[in-house]
Every structure is written in structure tokens, then in C-alpha cells.
């Protein structure tokens, strides 16, 4: 458990590692049904009510590790059997905690007349009248009123998850932005991201036979991950897996910063396009704002495209903290360039499936991007990079960014901008930096460990270590 | 003739940019744009020997300091 935040992540990792290990040996097809038994070998249950249920759920996890349900276009799926159907009844009085007091502040606080009392003066909530405003919970001196909410629904800020009639969670694909917040937050691991780890193994195997060169394009958030080893050892580990070489997606960030800042100065108002969950949100919730989304590629696609133009036999695998990138890679715009996407969680499993111990490897080098490309990984970074890119290109245009940290802030900013633009006015800002995850990519669902503050410090430090100090220098260094 | 200079991490920190800049300058000075195509790559598999470059399947090792001499001798000699 040294590298993960939760046991749910560890369980997912065990499955991915086992599936990968079998795939390397070409024994997966004959053995995949045995994997649940390999992970839970005894007769005693370790997580649930009985081993049979544990194994049945593990079989579902194996399926997800092998690509999940093909017919479902969403990369995030519910495993109904794993869902504990947590209570989602809204505000409730905890009988033991209600002191049957005289003050009845709950009743006073409720504007909807939803609180009533029984013969023992104990408070109850009339569900038909309750609007779930939470005033009663705040007013109670005994904290006797709680909100019963499913962690997945609480995590999903775009309201894509429902649990009608106390059933298993269900995802509305038309609203889901594949950010993976629910994946990380479900305490039962009942929502999970599909893995394409087998496709990556396939690419690496073919490359070993001389068919194609596989490039690992790593997201800058990597610097806050795999902290038990040095970044240079992670690079060595990737090469030991069979990757031809490792390139920073942040260099794609530098390229995007130059183009996006020009686009901003030409259009006068722009929203960023690097976070695929943010773009997906605009597509589903505010399609009329789509015209303002930057037409530039994301750093992942930009870098892959650059590599493929350099090397026609290249295969590009993006490795990052993001589940939404799995969706972005499948878009028509990205498809020709990005072959596969892996998360850091999946990369850890891939290393261990080959028994690659990063701590024992020599340190290789990773240094393609500038500080500005690297800080794309955290909230505020893209705005800083855009301002810098305007300066470096001598463009006389003042960027007035609004940094939106998390999808809730994005929603507010977009709604305000939409209102102003509709009225023919300009918002107070001309550049909306949208990041679906709070903190930015450093807090993405596919991270091994999550920590907004610590990971930000790590990424900033990594940024300062870049050899190239300006965006243009980093891009010029690879441009012929 | 195609010269492919490695601009991957290892060669980058060893000064691939200086090599590329030198080559670009010499190609222009000598008006060799039609004869030499300068390209980049992210790895030639010999990171310890960087800065690496490849000409017709053969990998050479140069530095910012030796780039001009290399160009005059190897590149001009082969043209």
C-alpha cells in the first residue's frame, strides 16, 4: 500500500497487475477466469459478506481491466454488483442523537414546514415537503440531522449519477464528462475506469518484434507521483517496459501556449481546450459556448502529432493522471495521433507486472519542456503560460484570465460569460482556464496519491528545474 | 542528404540546440538548403554518446563545440 491513497485503488491495481502479467506471458485468454481466485484465494471473505460475492465482483473488475463493456462508449462504468446502494435519502434526523429538546430550532429554521414532532417531542422530516436546503442540520445544537448522500453523487458535480428508488448507481452518459471524480470517491470501488492496458502491452510486444516504436508521452503531473523513486528512475522503468523513449507532454503544453495565446489575441475571448472533461462539459451542458473553446489541440494531442510527423512508425501512449483523456483519445480529432492512454495507477501495475523495481534502476533524463509547459498540470498554470507566451511573441494583448479550479467554478464562470456575451457585452475576463479537477491535473482521478497543496509544490519545483527557461526556447529546441 | 539530430531529453541537456543552430547557420551560409535536409528525432538509442545524429544509417556523436568541424569534414566531405 506504499503508493496508493485507498484500498480500492490497491484492489484495482492488483487486478490490473494480474491481467497484465498474464498478457505478457500470453496466458490471459486461458486464465482470466481464474484471476478472482488468485486475488482472493482462501475460503474466508476479506472485503464483503462472502468469498463468492468477492470473486464475482472481481470478475467484473477483470472485465474492466480488459477494456470493459465494448457497447458502452463511456470509459467510466458502474459495477452494479459492487455498488452498496448507499442511502441517498437526503436530510434525516438521527433518532439517537435527537435530544427531544424544547427549543425546536430545526422547526424554526425550516422555511418549508417539513419538520414535525412525535409524541416524545422527537423531530422528524416530512420528505414530501423537504427541499434539502440543510438549514435544519445547521441549526441543530446536537448535530442530530445529517445528510444521507451517496459519495458518488456528491463527487459528481455535473449531476450525471442517479440512484432512483434505492437502486445501484447509474451514469447518464449524456452528462458524464469522464473526469473520474466518482471513481476515486466511491468507497466500494463500484465505479471504475475502463483500462486499455492490454492494448499498450500489445503495442510494446509488437515493437519488440520490430513493428513500430512506442513513445511514452508523460503528463507533467508525474512529478508528484511515484515518489518512492526519482523521476529519472521512472523514465528508466518506462524504457525497461519497452518504450522507445519518453517525452514530456509539457512540451506539447509549450507549443499549445504559443498557439492558444495567439488565438486569444485574435478572437478576444477564449476558453481553454487542454482539459477534456471541461471541454466535454461545455459540449453537453452549454453547446452554444463551444465556439469559444480554443481550436488548438490539447498538449497530449499536440505532442503526439509532433512525434508522428517526425517518425512515421511512432505509436504514442499518453500516460497521465486523467480518466477523461481516455475519451479524448477516441475523438476524431485525436484518433490519428494518440494511440492509447494509461493512468499512473495503470502504469504502476504495468511496472509491477514486469517486476520492474524503480528504486533499483539508474536515473535517466527527462527534460523537454519549459517551466510554463510543466505548470499546465496545476490550476492557474495555463493562464500563466498564456500570458508568458503573449509576452514572448511580442503580442500587444492583455490576457485577463479567470482561473476556474474544479468543474463547479467552471460552471459559474461559463454561465456568467454566456449571459454577458448573449447581451453583446464582454465579461470582466477574456480567458477562462477550465480544469475539471480541483487543483488541476495533479489531482486527477488516475493519480496514485492525491494532495492539492503538496502536489502543486512538487509540480512547481519540477517546473523550475527545466533547462529551458522560456516557452519559445523549449519549442525552438525541437523545431528544425 | 538527410541529417537527423536527436533532440530528446538526454541530447537536449547535452546541447543539441547548439548543434542544430550551428548546422542551420552553416546550411544557410553555404546555400545548401537544396542539398541537406535537417530533421529531428527524440531518440537514436545511444543516449550516453549524445549529442547524437544520424546520417544515412550511421550514428555520430557531436557537441556544440565540435559541430562546425564535424560539418566541414564529415558533411561537406560526403556531399
Image: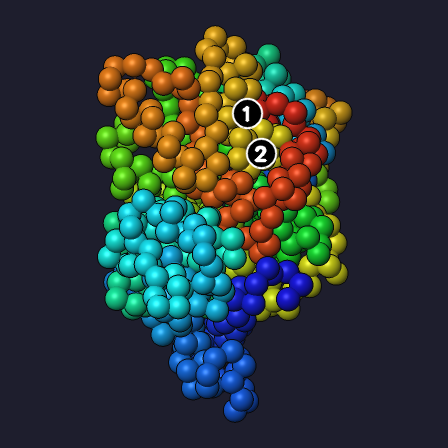
How many residues crowd around disc 2 within 10 Å: few (fewer than 14), some, or many (20 or more)?
many
Q: Is residue A84 above or below residue A40?
A: above
Q: Indicate the chain on which mark 1 is placed.
A: A
Tag 2 residue: A375
Is residue A281 visible in the rendered structure shown here? yes
Residue A243 x/y as whole percent: 56, 54
Residue A46 lies, with reference to residue A127, above or below; the image says below
Relative depth, front residue between B59 and A385: A385
Instruction: Label 2, secondary structure: give it.
Output: helix
Task: Answer few, some or many: residues within 10 Å of disc 1's Cα (few below 14, many 20 plus, some between 14 and 19).
Answer: some
Q: Examine the image and state in which quarter residue B49 appears.
A: top right
The residue positioned 26% from the left and 66% from the top of the image is: A165
Q: What element carries label 1?
A: helix
Residue A384 got which mark? 1
- Asked if labels 1 and 2 touch by Cβ distance under 8 angstroms, the answer is yes
Q: Earlier in the sequence, mark 2 or mark 1?
A: 2
**Cα–Cα span, label 2 and label 1:** 8 Å
Q: Image point 68% across, 43% down: which residue?
A: A365
The residue sitting at 36% across, 35% down in the picture is A411
At x 33%, y 15%, the residue is A426
Q: In this view, does A102 lie above or below A118?
A: above
Residue nearest the observer in this picture, B4 or A234:
A234
Amino acid at each position: 500500500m506504499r503508493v496508493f491513497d485507498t484500498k480500492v485503488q490497491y484492489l484495482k491495481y492488483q487486478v490490473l497487475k494480474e491481467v497484465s502479467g498474464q498478457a505478457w506471458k500470453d496466458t490471459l485468454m486461458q486464465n482470466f477466469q481464474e484471476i478472482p481466485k488468485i486475488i482472493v484465494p482462501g475460503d474466508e471473505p476479506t472485503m464483503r459478506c462472502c468469498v463468492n460475492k468477492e470473486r464475482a465482483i472481481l470478475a467484473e473488475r477483470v472485465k474492466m481491466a480488459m477494456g470493459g463493456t465494448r457497447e458502452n462508449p463511456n470509459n467510466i462504468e458502474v459495477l452494479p454488483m459492487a455498488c452498496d446502494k448507499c442511502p441517498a435519502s437526503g436530510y434525516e434526523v438521527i433518532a439517537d442523537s435527537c435530544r427531544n429538546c424544547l427549543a425546536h430550532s430545526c422547526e424554526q429554521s425550516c422555511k418549508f414546514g417539513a419538520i414535525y414532532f412525535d409524541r416524545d417531542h422527537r423531530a422528524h422530516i416530512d420528505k414530501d415537503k423537504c427541499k434539502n436546503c440543510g438549514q435544519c442540520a445547521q441549526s441543530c445544537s446536537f448535530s442530530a440531522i445529517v445528510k444521507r448522500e451517496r459519495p458518488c453523487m456528491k463527487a459528481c458535480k455535473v449531476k450525471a449519477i442517479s440512484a432512483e428508488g434505492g437502486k445501484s448507481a447509474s451514469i447518464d452518459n449524456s452528462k458524464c464528462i469522464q473526469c473520474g471524480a466518482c471513481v476515486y470517491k466511491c468507497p466500494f470501488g463500484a465505479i471504475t475506469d475502463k483500462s486499455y492496458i492490454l492494448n499498450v502491452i500489445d503495442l510494446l510486444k509488437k515493437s519488440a518484434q520490430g513493428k513500430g516504436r512506442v513513445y511514452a508521452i508523460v503528463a507533467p503531473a508525474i512529478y508528484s507521483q511515484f515518489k518512492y523513486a526519482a523521476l529519472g528512475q521512472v523514465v528508466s522503468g518506462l524504457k525497461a517496459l519497452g518504450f522507445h523513449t519518453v517525452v514530456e507532454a509539457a512540451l506539447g503544453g509549450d507549443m499549445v501556449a504559443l498557439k492558444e495565446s495567439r488565438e486569444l489575441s485574435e478572437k478576444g475571448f477564449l476558453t481553454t481546450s487542454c482539459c477534456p472533461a471541461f471541454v466535454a462539459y461545455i459540449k453537453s451542458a452549454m453547446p452554444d459556448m463551444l465556439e469559444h473553446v480554443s481550436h488548438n489541440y490539447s498538449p497530449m494531442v499536440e505532442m503526439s502529432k509532433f512525434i508522428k510527423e517526425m517518425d512515421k512508425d511512432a505509436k504514442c501512449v499518453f500516460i497521465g493522471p486523467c480518466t477523461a483523456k481516455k475519451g479524448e483519445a477516441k475523438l476524431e480529432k485525436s484518433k490519428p495521433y494518440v494511440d492509447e492512454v494509461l493512468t499512473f495507477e495503470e502504469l504502476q501495475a504495468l511496472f509491477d507486472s514486469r517486476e520492474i523495481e524503480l528504486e533499483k534502476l539508474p536515473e535517466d533524463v527527462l527534460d523537454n519542456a519549459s517551466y510554463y509547459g510543466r505548470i499546465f498540470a496545476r490550476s492557474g498554470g495555463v493562464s500563466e503560460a498564456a500570458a508568458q507566451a503573449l509576452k514572448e511573441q511580442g503580442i500587444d494583448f492583455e490576457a485577463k484570465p479567470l482561473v476556474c479550479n474544479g468543474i463547479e467554478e467552471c460552471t459559474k464562470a461559463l454561465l456568467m460569460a454566456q449571459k454577458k456575451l448573449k447581451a453583446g457585452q464582454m465579461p470582466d475576463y477574456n480567458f477562462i482556464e477550465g480544469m475539471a479537477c480541483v487543483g488541476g491535473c495533479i489531482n486527477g482521478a488516475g493519480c496514485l496519491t492525491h494532495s492539492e497543496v503538496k502536489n502543486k509544490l512538487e509540480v512547481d519545483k519540477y517546473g523550475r528545474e527545466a533547462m529551458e527557461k522560456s516557452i519559445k526556447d523549449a519549442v525552438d529546441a525541437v523545431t528544425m | 542528404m538527410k541529417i537527423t539530430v536527436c533532440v530528446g531529453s538526454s541530447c537536449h541537456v547535452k546541447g543539441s540546440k547548439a548543434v542544430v543552430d550551428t548546422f542551420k547557420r552553416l546550411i544557410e551560409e553555404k546555400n545548401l538548403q537544396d542539398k541537406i535536409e535537417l530533421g529531428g528525432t527524440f531518440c537514436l538509442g545511444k543516449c550516453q554518446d549524445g549529442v547524437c545524429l544520424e546520417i544515412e544509417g550511421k550514428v555520430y556523436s557531436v557537441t556544440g563545440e565540435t559541430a562546425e568541424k564535424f560539418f566541414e569534414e564529415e558533411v561537406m566531405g560526403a556531399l
